[in-house]
Image (tube, coloured by chain):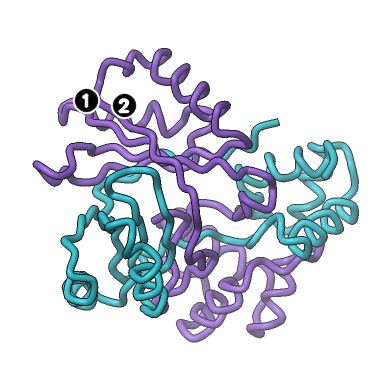
């Protein structure tokens, strides 16, 4: 990854303009060519540096129910509980974090009712009380790539 | 207000976009061909969706770990309710903060109501960055914690489709 890759990533985090020749506009800004930028983006996606390029749909506006949840899992049961959650299609991300609440995951369901049921299901499955922290407000989402 | 696309075409366009924007010089032209319409109508529809807030931007999802950003932390703060919008907006714009959300307190187990995601290359660097940020915003005295992630068990971001599992980065 070189300087142009970094500048391209930085610039794309502000969004691609909705015009007929978006790459021509970006190429002028970044003092390069459209072909060069498209090639760079292709490589970054193929190499797995980027996982997606395109409109970032607000899934909540498209329907569905989401939350961030946490469990305080006893250390000796950690792997077992992680395995239990791994089997659930509603679990989208699962991170171990250094805290008494040591397992943090996102639940994505089709409806609010599905979400409530999934939360109960996880409590029953694991025998652990769950922290349910749905998003109440999204503040400006800044996505700058440190130089 | 209509873009001139039929509901069926609009749905087809959204399905095509779930896979990402075509990587060609004229992506909207390419999409127009796929759904049998013209470039202007596709652009018009996408501008409408953008204005309606259906998507915020045509942007990218970074694979933080592949990029060497292995120190991923969740900063949580207990902000007085009267200040949360103002603080949330300031922190959300701060360099290094990727996402910033308000979530409910769950007393007595959980007191924090503001959540920020931070990615860095090294833990010490993230800690220093957060400390400086909190000082700059006069928040150091408010209760807060930094929860570093040490392991990823499941990560399936990148799908932004209705009626499917998949979530925006870190929910």
Residue farthest to the left, as pictured? B108
Which of B168/A128 is in front?
A128
Colour used to depict chain B in the structure image: purple
Q: Position of residue B116 (x, y in %)?
A: 39, 38
For the point 48% across and 68% down, the residue is: B160
To which quarter of the image does residue A146 belong? top right
Q: Residues within 10 Å of mark 1 (few under 14, many from 20)?
A: few
At 49% from the left and 38% from the top, the residue drawn is B118
- The residue at the point 54 percent across, 65 percent down is B158
Q: Residue furthest front?
A: A76
Vertical order, A136 against B79 (above or below): below
The subunit carrying tag 1 is: B
Q: Provide the residue designation for mark 2.
A: B87
Quarter of the image with the N terminus of chain A is top right
- Residue B109 position within the rendered picture, expressed as x and y whole percent measured from the top left: 14, 44
Q: In which quadrant of the rendered view does residue B83 lie?
A: top left
Residue A59 drawn at (x, y percent) = 40, 65
Q: Secondary structure at mark 1?
A: helix
Between marks 1 and 2, how big is the CA–CA gap? 6 Å
Q: Quadrant of residue B33?
A: bottom right
Whether residues under marks 1 and 2 lie with C-beta atoms below 8 angstroms apart, the answer is yes
Of residues B92 and B16, which is closer to you in this image?
Answer: B92
Please name the residue that numbered disc 1 is placed on.
Answer: B83
Dot 2: element: helix
Which chain is represented by cyan in the image?
A
Q: How many marks?
A: 2
């Amino acid at each position: 990854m070189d300087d142009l890759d970094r500048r391209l990533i930085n610039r794309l985090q502000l969004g691609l303009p909705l015009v007929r020749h978006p790459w021509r506009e970006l190429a002028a800004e970044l003092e390069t060519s459209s072909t060069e930028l498209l090639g760079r983006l292709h490589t970054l996606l193929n190499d797995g540096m980027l996982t997606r390029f395109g409109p970032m749909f607000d899934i909540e506006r498209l329907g569905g129910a989401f939350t961030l949840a946490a469990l305080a899992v006893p250390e000796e049961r950690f792997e077992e509980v992680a395995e239990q959650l791994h089997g659930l299609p509603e679990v989208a991300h699962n991170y171990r974090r250094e805290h008494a609440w040591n397992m943090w995951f996102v639940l994505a369901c089709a409806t609010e009712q599905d979400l409530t049921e999934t939360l109960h299901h996880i409590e029953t499955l694991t025998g652990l009380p769950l922290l349910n922290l749905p998003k109440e407000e999204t503040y400006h989402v800044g996505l700058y790539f440190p130089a | 207000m209509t873009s001139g696309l039929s509901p069926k075409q609009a749905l087809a366009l959204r399905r095509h976009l779930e896979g990402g924007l075509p990587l060609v010089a004229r992506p909207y032209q390419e999409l127009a061909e796929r759904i049998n319409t013209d470039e202007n109508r596709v652009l018009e529809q996408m501008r409408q969706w953008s204005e309606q807030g259906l998507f915020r931007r045509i942007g990218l999802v970074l694979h933080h770990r592949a990029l060497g950003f292995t120190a991923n932390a969740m900063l949580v703060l207990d902000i007085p309710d009267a200040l949360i919008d103002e603080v949330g907006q300031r922190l959300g714009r701060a360099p290094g903060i990727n996402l910033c959300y308000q979530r409910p307190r769950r007393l007595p187990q959980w007191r924090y109501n503001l959540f920020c995601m931070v990615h860095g290359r090294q833990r010490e660097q993230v800690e220093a960055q957060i400390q400086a940020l909190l000082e700059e915003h006069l928040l150091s005295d408010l209760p807060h914690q930094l929860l570093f992630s040490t392991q990823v068990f499941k990560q399936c971001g990148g799908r932004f489709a209705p009626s499917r599992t998949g979530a925006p980065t870190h929910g």
